[in-house]
Amino acid sequence: MDLVLVLVAVVALIVVATTALKTHPFLALLLGAFAAAFGFRLPLDEVVPTITGGFGGILGGIGIVIVLGTIIGVVLERSGGAVTLAEVVVKVLGQRFPTLTISAIGFIVSIPVFCDSGYVILNSLKESMARRTHTSMVAMSVALATGLFATHTLVPPTPGPIAAAGNLGLTDQLGLVILVGLVVAVVAAAVGLLWASRFTDAVPDGAGGDELAAAVEDVEALKARYGTLPGPAAALAPILVPILLICVGSVAALPAAPLGEGDVASVVRFVGQPVVALLVGLALAVALVRPGAGTRRESFRDAVGDGLVASAPILLITGAGGAFGAVIQATDIGDYLGSNLSELGIGVLMPFLVSAALKSAQGSSTVALVTTSALVAPLLGDIGMDSDLGRVLVVMAIGAGAMTVSHANDSYFWVVTQFSRMSVAQAYRTQTVATLLMGCTAAAFTWFLALVLV
């Protein structure tokens, strides 16, 4: 019982530090790791090696993947590739069902691009479609925001799900995480879309938003700002090719060895490793880079630099989460909690509840994904989820919790609110409730999959 009290106190310390004290999550997690080590009474000569080993171990497995995925997202954002992806979906789905179309666009774009960046990029397209189809701006905003949010928390190569998969020992099974994540994300996005359809007659009731929200461009103006947009094949390749390589590589690595044990299977497994697959995606993204003030090479260098800057906080938070998890793994708390949690019979719902509590308390989905995955990693065997598929479903449960809920302490909430020109009260009724419904439904669906498949 003393171990549980220490754990609760440390988690509370992390939450208070990141919310009330505004401490950076990296520092909060690192200090939490030391506090946990002292509280659990680890031998002093083991404290630092345990923390540094956990930090380096998780980054050694997943750090390069996070960096490469972030750089690809930056290139797609700057080159107009994300806009091309949006136009492809519009052509395929048409404008007969505008909320479905904009939700599908967000769903696809947010696989490589952060949801807040994706919303900013696609805001003008959303506004233009809403005017062209005479659809409520509120309904369109909620449909776009929920479509983006679904894949942001559930589908690699978005950094949060990648980090959670790494913490749970799934670095070599990202293909399976992607496949299951897409299925669960479709369910979550569908719930968000249904909720958005309730507001077909609603009008934004904010005071006009900030200058960015007011500066709405139509699609032609957006194209003019980017210049010549990349073609559909070129824009899709940096996303689609790595995902296909990872999925095929995962199939080749199955115990049944469906592709055999020859050289071909070895090559497929090699290029299907996430680091190699994303390097291929980055090579394909180079074709999207256009010269800015300097040469194409300089523009690519700038994109890589910005990608490194954007990924640095995620890497540090992920590493600190690994350090925190390593301290927990060095104690007997896993056996104690596991025996008690298995008696409760909630299984995969436990990671969801922990993640949802963290998300609601401190606002960051990435922090909720990283912290919860580090916390529950030692407990997987005790809750009966230590198989590969069980671990994947735990990632889904954590991702569902990382949706629940987006409100005033979440930067994405303010991006949606300001760019949609909704008041805070209206955003709570629409966007926040949508994330609550999405998270709970995704968790229930994950629980059902666990009952059937694990």
Image: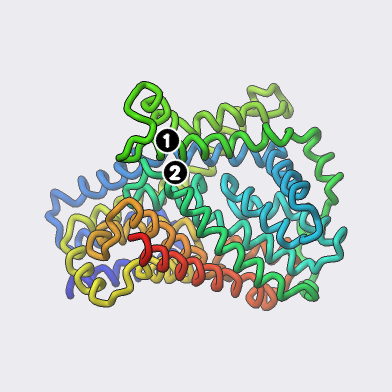
Pointers 1 and 2 in contact (C-beta within 8 Å): yes
Q: Position of residue 239 (x, y in %)?
A: 58, 39
The residue singled out by tag 1 in the image is 249
Colouring: rainbow
Relative vertical location of residue 320 with respect to residue 300 in this rendering, above or below:
below
Question: Which residue lies at the image location 46% right of the left edge and 40% below the top edge?
Answer: 247
> Which quadrant of the structure image shows residue 95?
bottom right
- Left or right of 192, for residue 15: left
Does 391 appear above or below 443?
above
The residue that appears at 80% across and 69% down in the rendered structure is 136
What residue appears at the point 59 percent right and 61 percent down from the top-left corner? 411
Quadrant containing the N terminus is: bottom left
> Is residue 304 or residue 100 the one in the foreground?
100
Dot 1: within a 10 Å radius of its alpha carbon, few (fewer than 14), some, or many (20 or more) residues? many
**What count of labels does the image hold?**
2
Q: At numbered mark 1, what does the secondary structure look like: helix, strand or loop?
A: helix
- Residue 115: name its quadrant: bottom right
The mark nearer the N terminus, 1 or 2, is: 2
**Does dot 2 land on a helix, a strand or a loop?**
helix
Please, what is the three-letter code of the amino acid marked with disc 2?
Answer: Gly
Percent coordinates x, y for residue 405 in the rendering = 53, 70
Amino acid at circle 1? Gly
The answer to whether residue 11 is left or right of residue 326 is: right
Q: Is residue 408 visible?
A: no
Can you identify the residue that label 2 sits on? 175
> Measured from the top left, where is residue 310 in percent x and y?
54, 44
